[in-house]
Image (cartoon, rainbow, N blue to C red):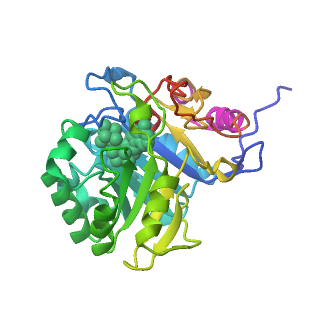
């Protein structure tokens, strides 16, 4: 008698006892911006034929939901530039309706929000992250190379009108926006939005030198404490940000500090690329290619679940990001837009 593989779908617990309940999906590596810390200006993107179809992405995401993923973030690249992306949101919203999924959310540069905000809300999306590193139009152009601040502002307003809670994400960049943090905070908190600051991470080759961009958030925090009262709060969104309440504004401020203090010990996530590669850590190269398994087994997910189980068993303890003058190479060669930020 041949033994059949175990087709049950157990929840995902990695070798360090971490329960995986959060999946981030990069639905495209393409983008309509070229942010200086994220991409080089002349990127070679994946050939379109390598991409999973939206139906395949839905199948993969649904398999993860069956394995206990409660939070799903659609990201990229710029997720809203993927053709017909709203089909995927509509499809995935069934898991919100059934209660299997707690949250379906999105990280976006905001350029297409004006068009899609209302439908995102109709699909059950409640909160979105919008990346915004500066409020200065000229600086915005310098950072994003191709972006237009006015369009992003209109997108944020459209999202708010649609009833989406907007969180502003800003990468803290030395000499670029380091003196604008208070202004960004006033902007976000003034409209009832959270602001989260992110340390730049050594992912993929870019034109500039990351040492020139890197601004430790420990420095930002110390500076803010000269002028504001920051009270640690236990608020969590399922991600690595640690939050404070700014007493003077009443708003929440988050810090994502992969360099100065990583929180790998509580990592609850894995990341899927638009070609079906599963990365168990943002900062490590090990991955599992789920696309051949998916395509070889169109009618049932048993082999897929087996491949996922094997991958989770290899989830590393953490990343080893370093940015200094002696470590000039990125920790991994792929850009954030591939793995999904
Ligand atoms: N295009 C969308 C956006 O910009 O929000 C989604 C993808 S983008 C890769 C997700 C987030 O990653 C953005 O907030 C961006 O600022 C951040 N990011 C990109 N490259 C980064 C890097 N090297 N270090 C830290 N954050 C980075
Ligand atoms: Fe595009 Fe987002 Fe990367 Fe900027 S950070 S280039 S918007 S993927």
Residue 72 visible (yes or no): yes
Report the quarter where the N terminus lies: top right
In this view, the residue farthest toward the front is: 226
255 w.r.t. 278: above or below: below
Secondary structure of the magenta portion, mostly?
helix
205 w.r.t. 249: above or below: above
**x, y percentage for residue 100?**
55, 61
Direction from residue 52 to residue 279 in the image, left or right: right
Q: Which residue is drawn at 48% across and 54% down?
A: 219
Report the quarter where the C terminus lies: top left
Q: Which of 297 and 54 is in front in this view?
A: 54
Q: Residue at x 21, y 46 (%)?
A: 140
Direction from residue 10 to residue 139 in the image, left or right: left
Q: Which of 275 and 340 is in front in this view?
A: 340
Q: Which residue is drawn at 32% across and 49% down?
A: 108
Is-magenta flag for residue 124? Answer: no
Numbered disc total: 0
Picture quadrant of residue 128: bottom left
The quarter of the rendering in which ligand 1 is drawn is top left
Residue 125 visible (yes or no): no
Q: What stretch is highlighted in magenta?
A: 294-312
Is-magenta flag for residue 300? Answer: yes
């Amino acid at each position: 008698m041949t033994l059949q593989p175990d087709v049950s779908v157990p929840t995902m617990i990695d070798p360090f006892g971490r329960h995986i309940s959060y999946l981030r999906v990069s639905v495209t590596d393409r983008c309509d911006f070229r942010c200086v810390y994220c991409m080089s200006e002349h990127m070679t993107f994946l050939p379109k034929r390598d991409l999973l179809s939206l139906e395949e992405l839905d199948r993969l995401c649904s398999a993860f939901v069956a394995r206990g993923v409660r939070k799903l973030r659609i990201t990229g690249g710029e997720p809203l530039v993927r053709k017909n992306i709203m089909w995927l949101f509509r499809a995935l919203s069934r898991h919100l309706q059934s209660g299997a999924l707690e949250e379906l959310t999105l990280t976006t540069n905001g350029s297409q929000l004006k068009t899609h905000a209302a439908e995102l809300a109709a699909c059950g999306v409640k909160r979105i992250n919008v990346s915004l590193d500066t409020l200065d139009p000229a600086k915005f152009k310098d950072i994003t190379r191709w972006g237009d601040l006015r369009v992003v502002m209109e997108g944020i307003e459209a999202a708010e009108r649609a009833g989406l809670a907007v969180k502003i994400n800003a990468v803290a960049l030395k000499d670029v926006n380091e003196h604008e943090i208070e202004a960004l905070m006033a902007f976000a908190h003034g409209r009832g939005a959270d602001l989260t600051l992110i340390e730049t991470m050594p992912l993929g080759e870019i034109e500039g030198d990351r040492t020139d961009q890197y601004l430790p958030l420990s420095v930002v925090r110390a500076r803010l404490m000269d002028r504001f009262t920051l009270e640690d709060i236990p608020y969590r969104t399922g991600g690595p940000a640690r939050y404070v309440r700014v007493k003077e504004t009443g708003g929440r401020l988050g810090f994502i500090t992969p360099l100065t203090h990583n929180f790998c010990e509580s990592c609850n996530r894995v990341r899927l690329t638009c070609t079906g590669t599963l990365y168990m850590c943002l900062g490590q190269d090990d991955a599992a290619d789920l696309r051949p398994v998916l395509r070889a087994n169109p009618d049932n997910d048993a082999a897929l679940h087996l491949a996922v189980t094997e991958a989770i068993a290899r989830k590393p303890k953490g990343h080893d990001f370093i940015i200094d003058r002696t470590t000039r190479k990125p920790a991994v060669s792929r850009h954030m837009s591939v793995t999904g930020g």
